[in-house]
Structure formats: C-alpha cells, structure tokens
Image (cartoon, rainbow, N blue to C red):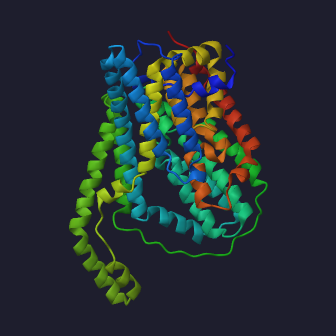
C-alpha cells in the first residue's frame, strides 16, 4: 500500500492517546463501522476548520461526533459480547481527560483573575506611555510574547500584545499585520519549552515522558524558531514613531498577590509531580483553593479598604476616583471560573473522545507501524509538525502519545517542539493565529500571514537543526 497517499495522511490523525485508551482486542480498521467512524470525524473536523466562515463554535461538531463514534463502538463490541471492554476504554479516556481539563481550568481561572485585576491592562498602558518607535515595538511585543507565553499560554499572550499594537498604531495596516505575524510565531515558540505554554506540552508532561526541567532543553531551539523570521521581518518595519497615546491604568487590589499565588500554584503542581509522583492536577486544584481563600480575604476586607480610599480621595478632591470607587464590586472566584474558555475545553473533550474511539477500533497499531517503523522518527516528527499547521496540534500529539513508539528522549522533545511551533506556518494553525484574525480583523488575515510562510518555515527547520545539534546526546536510545 502507498504510505504517501492522502488516505494515510488523514488516518494518521485517527488514533487515540497512549494512556487514553485500552488496547483493542478486535481489529475493526477494515470494517464498515471503522470507515463510518473515520468519515464522521473527517466531517466534524471539516466543520471545525470552517469555524470562521460558519460562525459556529468548534466544540459543537466534535461533541456530536464523539457521541456517535462511541455509540457505534459500543454497539460493535456489545454485538460481539465484549461490551465491558468498550465501557472500560471509555471510562479510561474520560478519566485522563478530566485530569487535563481540571488542570487547564485552574490555569484559565488564574489568567482571568489577573485580567480582571487589570494586570495586563497595566502592562499595555506602560508600553503605550513609553513612546517606543515602530522597530522597538516590533521587538518588544514579539519578545514579551515569547517570554510571557510559557506561563500565561500562547492565546492570552497573543491577544495582549495585539491589543498594544492596535492601540499605538491604529490605522497602519502594514505594521499591524507584520507585528501580528511576529506575535503569533513568538507566542507559539515560547509555549513550546514549558508544560504550561501549550496543551500539547502539558500532555507530554502529564504522561510522564518529559520531566518539568527537561523542557528547558528546547529553550534555544524555540528562541531560534522565533528569531529567524523576526530578524527578516524587522527589515520591513519602518523606523518611525507612532502618534503619542496616553492611557492610565490603576491596578485593582490584590493583583500582584494573585500573580504570586499563580506562581505558587505552578510550584505546587510541579513538586507534586516530581517529588511525590502524584498527578500535577492535585497541585493545581490546591492552588484554586489558594485563590478562593484570597478571594474571601478580599471580600471581607473590601469595606475597610474602600473607606480608606474614599477618605484619601475626598481629601485630595479627586471626584473621578470617588466615582470609580463607587462602582467597585467584590472579587468573585467563581465568576472567573465561568469566564474560562469553555468552548476550548469542550473541544478538547470532543477531540480526546473521538480519537480515543477511533484508536480503540485498531488504528493505533496501524499508524504506529507506518510512521515509526517505515519512516525515520526525525522525518515523522518533522512531518507531523507541518501537518499541525492545517490540523490542530491536539489530535496530532494524541496520535503520537497513542502510538507510544520506541523513541529516544531527544525525539520526544523534537515532536514537542514541532507540534508546538508547526502551527505558526499558517494563521489557522494555532489558537493564537485564529484569535488574532478576529481581534485585528481587516489588518491580519490568512493571506497576510501566508506571505511570510517561507521565512517562518526557515525558522521552523532551523529550530529543528539547532535541537538535533545542541541536544544530540539525547538522541541515543538506551535499553
């Protein structure tokens, strides 16, 4: 069979994550049910890719597809007297997804809490007040996107940096478009060397394949991934100053302390996993408790704090501040939970259950044989990164985890790097790119990003080369 045919490219994605499904005892890859399940997933994913045109949230089609696929799987196994195997596999998939979902939910809650306390607004206002030139803004926004995304995730970081550019360079289509491309590349590259920077790195960490500190071996390759296209693009930035804009932002009470609690939460999760060999989600949920206690403290002490601030404003004759203080509402942790990206979390559930069901039908062993036996691991991992520019990197990473191929540590880091940064090649290849197309509508488009794809690809392959050269000692298999 021709392993380079489009059929193999599509079926590559229809496998389950390694620790996300039990091994199937019935091979259904050549059956009618197997074909129908693949067709359902392809149709659902086509609807996901058309999200921007259809104005339909991406979670809807995959939720329905997951239900239909598992109903067919359950029916197929029950009809052969093995219904308990399908039930066990589904429950195992659900348990593993629940751990990841709760982890992400806590991280999103903290990010939303810091946003509500105006921490990101204050950072944006500081940058605007400094009166940087276009070239300085290009490098500062790209650099900050690379530095912040390992902690705040690539989507939040990209939106923050885009807001700065839209504010200071209003109307300058060429500059805004160029900066948005750089921000997307930087945010994706920065998220590739941290378990908290992207869902794919989080999955690899939670699977126990790469430890927390080992991700930092990808720091320099990730930096190269960002710098190569950024250096080329910087030559096309005009060296002029935008018109001066001023914006004053006052941090809400507790903003910096919530940031500290977020760092403490991350530390707790890392220590639970590395020292006690417990799931990181334990530390994250404990960290949610930190935030709830602090939210209680803010509510209890709010009346006294407002009274002091009103007295100070009254003495200073600051009527504007008096008016602002009158609109202050207590901090509510659960309102921050409600503002989490539920569409993303439900999409994640749909993807996990879809590929889990398809993998349980037998595509796991089939794809493992094709990719990692007939192709070299370096070629396979590089190709998967390129595929993630079109297909979301979540199912791509699930595919690799599901195959559990015998790879060296360096190869596992390579697929982490390529899956995290391959989406930068197209604007639709990452959550950051899709979000910026909406935020900078009319400035940053699919076509404006595609124009820079060759230099982004140059950075992609350069980062792979740097990883292989720098971490060559990790590429030897140890028995």
Compared to 387, does 339 lie above or below? below
439 and 471: which is toward the camera: 439
Give how far across and how far down residue 199 sits, in percent. Answer: 48, 39
Left or right placement of residue 286 versus residue 430 in this view:
left
446 and 260: which is toward the camera: 446
The residue lying at 76 percent from left, 41 percent from top is 454
Q: Residue farthest to the left?
A: 300
Left or right placement of residue 43 versus residue 241 in this view:
left
Give how far across and how far down residue 88 sits, in percent. Answer: 32, 22
Left or right placement of residue 399 versus residue 232 in this view:
left
Give how far across and how far down residue 410 sits, in percent. Answer: 57, 23
- Residue 399 visible in the picture: no
Give how far across and how far down residue 25 sits, in percent. Answer: 41, 12
The residue lying at 50 percent from left, 35 percent from top is 200
Within the image, what quadrant is residue 301 found in?
A: bottom left
Compared to 369, does 345 lie above or below? below
The residue lying at 38 percent from left, 58 percent from top is 113
């Amino acid at each position: 069979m021709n392993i380079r045919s489009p059929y193999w490219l599509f079926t590559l994605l229809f496998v389950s994550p390694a620790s996300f499904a039990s091994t199937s005892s019935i091979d259904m890859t050549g059956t009618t049910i197997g074909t129908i399940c693949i067709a359902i997933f392809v149709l659902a994913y086509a609807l996901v890719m058309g999200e921007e045109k259809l104005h339909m949230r991406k979670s809807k089609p995959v939720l329905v597809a997951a239900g239909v696929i598992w109903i067919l799987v359950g029916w197929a196994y029950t009809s052969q007297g093995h219904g308990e195997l399908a039930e066990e596999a589904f429950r195992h998939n659900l348990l593993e997804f629940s751990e990841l979902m709760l982890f992400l939910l806590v991280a999103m809650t903290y990010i939303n809490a810091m946003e509500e306390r105006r921490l990101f607004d204050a950072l944006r206002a500081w940058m605007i007040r400094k009166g940087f030139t276009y070239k300085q803004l290009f490098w500062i926004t790209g650099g900050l996107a690379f530095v912040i995304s390992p902690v705040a995730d690539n989507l939040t970081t990209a939106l923050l940096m885009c807001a700065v550019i839209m504010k200071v360079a209003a109307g300058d289509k060429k500059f805004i478009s160029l900066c948005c491309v750089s921000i997307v590349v930087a945010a994706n590259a920065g998220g590739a060397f941290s378990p908290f920077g992207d869902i794919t790195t989080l999955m690899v960490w939670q699977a126990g394949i790469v430890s927390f500190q080992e991700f930092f071996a990808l720091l320099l390759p990730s930096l190269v991934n960002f710098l190569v296209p950024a250096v080329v693009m910087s030559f096309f930035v005009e060296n002029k100053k935008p018109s001066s804009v001023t914006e004053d932002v006052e941090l809400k009470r507790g903003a910096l302390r919530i940031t500290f609690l977020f760092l403490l939460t991350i530390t707790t999760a890392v220590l639970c996993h590395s020292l006690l060999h417990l799931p990181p989600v334990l530390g994250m949920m404990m960290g949610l408790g930190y935030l709830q206690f602090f939210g209680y403290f803010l509510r209890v002490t709010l009346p006294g704090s407002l009274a002091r601030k009103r007295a100070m404003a009254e003495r200073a004759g600051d009527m504007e501040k008096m008016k602002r203080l009158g609109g202050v509402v207590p901090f509510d942790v659960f309102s921050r939970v409600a503002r989490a990206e539920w569409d993303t979390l439900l999409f994640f559930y749909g993807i996990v259950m879809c590929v889990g069901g398809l993998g349980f039908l037998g595509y796991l062993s089939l794809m493992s044989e094709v990719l990692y036996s007939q192709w070299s691991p370096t070629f396979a991992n590089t190709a998967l990164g390129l595929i993630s520019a079109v297909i979301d990197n979540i199912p791509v990473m699930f595919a690799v985890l599901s195959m559990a191929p015998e790879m060296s540590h360096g190869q596992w880091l390579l697929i982490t790097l390529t899956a995290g940064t391959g989406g930068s090649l197209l604007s639709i290849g990452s959550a950051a790119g899709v979000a910026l197309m909406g935020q900078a509508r009319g400035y940053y488009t699919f076509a404006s990003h595609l124009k820079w794809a060759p230099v982004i690809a140059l950075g992609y392959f350069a980062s792979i080369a740097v990883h292989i050269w720098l971490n060559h000692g990790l590429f030897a298999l140890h028995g």
